Structure formats: C-alpha cells, structure tokens
Image (spheres, helix red, strand yellow):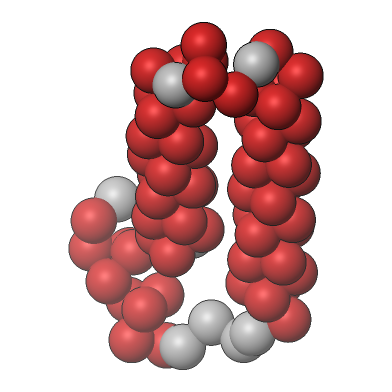
C-alpha cells in the first residue's frame, strides 16, 4: 500500500513540475505542443499507476509488512 502511495505522490510531483515547465515556455512552443505534452504525461502517469497496482496485487504480502501495518493501526 505505501509503495503505491509513494508512486502516486512521485507521479503527481513529476507531472506538476512538467506542467510548470511547459507553461513557463508556453509562448515558445505553442498551445498544441503544450496540450500534447500534458496529455502524454498524464497517460504515462496512469500507466505507471496501473502497473504498480497490478504488481501490488500479484505480490504476496510479507508477514513482517502485515505486522507493521497492524502496529500502525
């Protein structure tokens, strides 16, 4: 669970930085290029999150990890 949340946060930060960079250079590259880049970034982030969720479902949870979750709850 924490790994997928970390990936989600990382993808969000990367997307925000990319969006900020693109918007700062908006006048140089034009609106169509910005829209295409943002769309490609969103698709990549979604793919990474989907793959992470599939890996998380496929990997058995270790007893040590489960024990740590129980203590935290």
Instruction: Note whether residue 42 is visible.
Output: no
Q: What residue is drawn where x is 52% and y is 20%?
A: 28
Q: What residue is drawn where x is 68% and y is 76%?
A: 55
Residue 3 falls in image quadrant: bottom left
In the image, 24 versus 64, the foreground residue is: 24
Residue 71's place in the image compared with 17, above or below, is below
Residue 55's place in the image compared with 38, above or below, is below
Left or right side of 20 for 46: right
Left or right side of 11 for 44: right
Q: What residue is drawn where x is 33% and y is 63%?
A: 70
Q: Residue 23's spot in the image, x, y percent?
A: 47, 17
Residue 62's place in the image compared with 27, above or below, is below
Residue 60 falls in image quadrant: bottom right
Q: Residue 39's spot in the image, x, y percent?
A: 74, 32
Q: What residue is drawn where x is 29% and y is 50%?
A: 73
Q: Residue 71's spot in the image, x, y percent?
A: 23, 63
List the single residue furthest toward the left. Answer: 71
In the image, 34 versus 29, the foreground residue is: 29
């Amino acid at each position: 669970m924490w790994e997928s949340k970390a990936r989600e946060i990382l993808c969000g930060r990367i997307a925000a930085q990319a969006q900020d960079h693109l918007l700062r250079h908006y006048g140089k590259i034009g609106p169509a290029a910005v829209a295409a880049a943002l769309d490609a970034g969103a698709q990549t982030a979604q793919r990474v999150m989907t793959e992470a969720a599939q890996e998380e479902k496929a990997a058995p949870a270790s007893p040590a990890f489960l024990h740590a979750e129980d203590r935290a709850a």
